[in-house]
Image (cartoon, grey):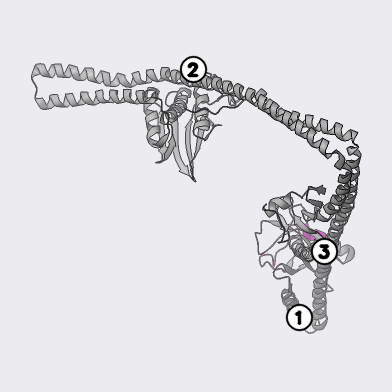
Amino acid sequence: MRWNVKPSFRLTTLIVLFPLVALLLYGGLSHLFFFYSQRKEIKREALKYEQTLMDMEGNRLRDRVENMVQFVRYYDSKSSNKIKKDAKSIVNLAVNVTNNLYAKYKDTLDENALKKMIISALEGIKFEGDLGYLFLIDMQGNIFVHIDPEMVGTNIMNIQDVQGKYIVREFTKVLREKGEGFVDYYWYIVSEDRKEMHYKISYVKLLDCYNWYVGAGEYLKYMKRDVRKDILTYIKDNHQFTDGYFFVSNSKHKIIYAPDDINTSGETKKGFLARYVQKGLYRDKHYMAYTDYIPEYDWYITAVENLKSIQKNSDFQKKQNELKREANIKINYYLMLFTWVISILLSLYLSSILNRKLKNYESRLKETNEKLVFQSRQALLGELLPMIAHQWRQPINKIASILALLRFNVDKKVGCDKLDAYYKDMENNIEFMSETIDDFRTFYQPKDQSSVEDLKALILKSIEFVEGSIRKKDIQLYTQLEEVSYSLYQNEFLQVMINLIKNAVDSLPVKGKIKVVLNQKNHIVTIIVEDNGKGIDPQNIEKVFDPYFTTKEDSMGLGLYMTKIIIEKHMSGTVRIEQLSPGTRFIIELYQNT
């Protein structure tokens, strides 16, 4: 049995701190050296020069992004106004058509015929495919023209949108005050799900006849969609500038637009670009980026610039500073070499100490874990022996009865056939007892290597171990087991299943129910053991897998702890617990190698 050993917190801390201490020592010595050689001043001048270049370039980058954001907002405003203007133009066209027809035929056609002519003329006016349409309503809320046939002939004076706004009343209010105007509200799209409401802006205008008015509108959903397309086209055409480019993403880290020729140095484009989506200025070793956010579109507009040109200027300045430092290179080299030698020697010395301590710790931990395994097996042994005794009681009683019958029939000198039947029945009961002992003995034989096992057969065998307790409480056991093979330690898996099924039995009253499920899907083997017993106290739910935690008087509290250790450490799986109402469910998941 193998155990994964973790070093103690104190030793781990020492391992982590040692390189830091060594680097701190080196940094301190270097600082003293450069202090006396005025290296600090030279370095500060170089950094100041580089920072000046970076600040200038950062300001230029910010100006580029802000100009792009201003364009987006300007175009959005301009496009929204254009859409409103288009809706107004369509309505004015419809009003002119209606007024002209009325003026031309009011004296020659009767009223009904003239109304039909006007309605027919307005029904033929369409724009923006099926999304743009006209509607004709009178001041009492009766609909005469609408793209939805179900709306024609109905009265919608009292219809409210999802925000409680009385739509027609808003129309009539605007019309009475101004004779025409815009109204915003929520309405469904006829060609889509009518239960889903969308934000819409409509323009309405009174007619000269019949106390009617005409309206037309546009859904913001499609207004923004078209505007987005135009803006992205503009960004695609203007995304490049000297040593840089623009890209657009959203709050879900989805790339809306990015150039195709980005050099990511082997990194994925999405991961490369997501690094720079930080509102404001961002800079790393190779790139500088500035990002601004447009909440109306949920867009992050980012400008990224390669710092090669700035780096060249900075490198030139650094070379000039290097000329001032050449006199001190030799001394600095020996000082660093001395520091490295000291660090290596200290590292070797401390590493040897740590190695010895870790080995001692591993040995103690392994010994402790082996003791826990032995204790859990011994505890399980004490719990299984009464079960086996219960299983044996029935066949022993039956054998005694058969012997009594044999003695009686021998005295009566019955035929050999009947005696053979008694002998065979007795042999079957003895064989059952022998098999029980073999299973019990096999369960306690240690195994050093895992093997591919039939999980269904092992689960059925574990049920046999606790069958006596199940029958004693008259528990209803339901199994739903698929044929599944898995590489594991047979006895450890038996120990897990016996622990879980026995826990279920212990938590149940007489005539309770237990369900055991085994299945495999997408290379994940799932085992479920659930019962309808009293469940676990919520304040103890986080402690059930702790060693020595138990609510039973005659238990050591190692069963579920060892179950978790075996599943997670030896089978690379997971085990968790869920509260039912009533009852408890344990879920094991084992992951097959693909």
* Label 2, residues with CA under 10 Å away: few <14, some 14-19, many ≥20: some
What residue did someone put label 2 on? 555
In front: label 3 or label 1: 3
- Label 3 sits on residue: 80
- Label 3 vs label 1: CA separation? 42 Å
Give the percent coordinates (x, y) of residue 141.
76, 63
Span of residues in magenta: 144-171
Which residue is identified by label 1?
Answer: 110
> Gap in Å between the C-alphas at discs 1 and 2?
99 Å
Q: Which sits earlier in the primary sequence, circle 2 or circle 3? A: 3
Say whether residue 113 is left or right of residue 592: right
Left or right of residue 456, residue 190 in this image: right
Label 1 residue SS: loop
- Disc 2 vs disc 3: which is toward the camera? 2
Q: Is residue 159 magenta?
A: yes
Label 2 residue SS = loop
Label 3 neighbourhood size at 10 Å, few (<14), some (14-19), many (20+)?
Answer: some
Image vertical order of residue 156 relative to residue 280, above or below: below
At x 86%, y 45%, the residue is: 322
Mark before the other along the chain sequence, 3 or 1: 3
Q: Amino acid at mark 3?
A: Ser
Looking at numbered disc 1 in the image, what kind of residue is underneath it?
Answer: Asp
Mark 2 residue type: Ser
Tell me residue 565's x, y (percent).
52, 28
- Residue 565 marker: none
